[in-house]
């Protein structure tokens, strides 16, 4: 078997798969919010905040499924292409809406090392953090997720991909 680079241990996600997994995330989050009627076990969320850019598609699907109309973004940069870099907050959500995060659902596509969510959690300690996919190092930063993948797996999201020919695993035809 040929040697493979770390990024070649890939988990390819299609648009259909991200949609199914994001809907599953919504179902898991349904009723967990603090905004319930008197006597209810749980309730809804005041708003969703997507961590850009990867959290935008899942957040849109979760917002639709849970009928959440208030959606904002926080822009956090922690990667340069496929290399992790210094974490920087580039854009903040509405401060009046956010408060300490109570009743806010923060959504991202993936938690990897956990650095991005750690930075956001420091700002909004009472928010609920949800990701579609989680790696072991970042799992402690997430309250709810759907699928765990190994730390050395690179997830290829559909918004980063284009269809093209791929060589067969064992070489030429």
Image: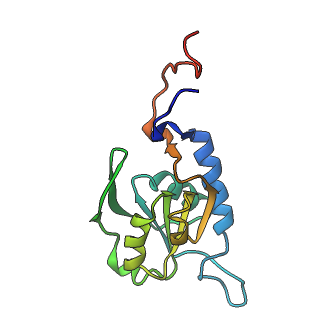
The N terminus, quarter of image: top right
Is residue 67 or residue 74 the one in the foreground? 74
Q: Is residue 100 above or below residue 118?
A: below
At which x and y percent is residue 32? 64, 76
Q: Is residue 6 above or below residue 65?
A: above
Q: Residue furthest bottom?
A: 38
At which x and y percent is residue 126? 48, 82
Is residue 123 or residue 98 the one in the foreground? 123
At which x and y percent is residue 24? 67, 57
Q: Residue at x 57, y 41 (%)?
A: 13
Q: Residue at x 55, y 11 (%)?
A: 172
Q: Is residue 71 visible?
A: yes
Is residue 72 or residue 117 the one in the foreground? 117
Quarter holding residue 115 = bottom left
The figure's colour scheme reads rainbow
Q: Is residue 77 above or below residue 12?
A: below
């Amino acid at each position: 078997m040929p040697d493979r680079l770390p990024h070649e241990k890939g988990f390819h996600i299609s648009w259909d798969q991200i949609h199914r997994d994001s809907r599953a995330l919504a179902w898991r989050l349904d009723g967990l919010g603090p905004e319930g009627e008197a006597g209810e076990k749980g309730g809804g969320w005041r708003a969703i905040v997507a961590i850009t850019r990867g959290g935008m598609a899942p957040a849109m699907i979760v917002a639709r499924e849970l009928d959440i109309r208030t959606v904002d973004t926080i822009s956090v940069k922690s990667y340069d292409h496929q290399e992790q870099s210094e974490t920087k907050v580039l854009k903040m959500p509405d401060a009046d809406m956010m408060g300490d995060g109570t009743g806010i659902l923060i959504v991202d596509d993936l938690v990897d090392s956990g650095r991005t969510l750690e930075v956001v959690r420091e700002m909004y300690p009472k928010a609920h953090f949800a990701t579609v996919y989680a790696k072991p190092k970042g799992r402690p930063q997430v309250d709810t997720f759907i699928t765990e993948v190994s730390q050395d797996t690179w997830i290829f999201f559909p918004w980063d991909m284009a269809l093209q020919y791929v060589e067969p695993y064992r070489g030429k035809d």
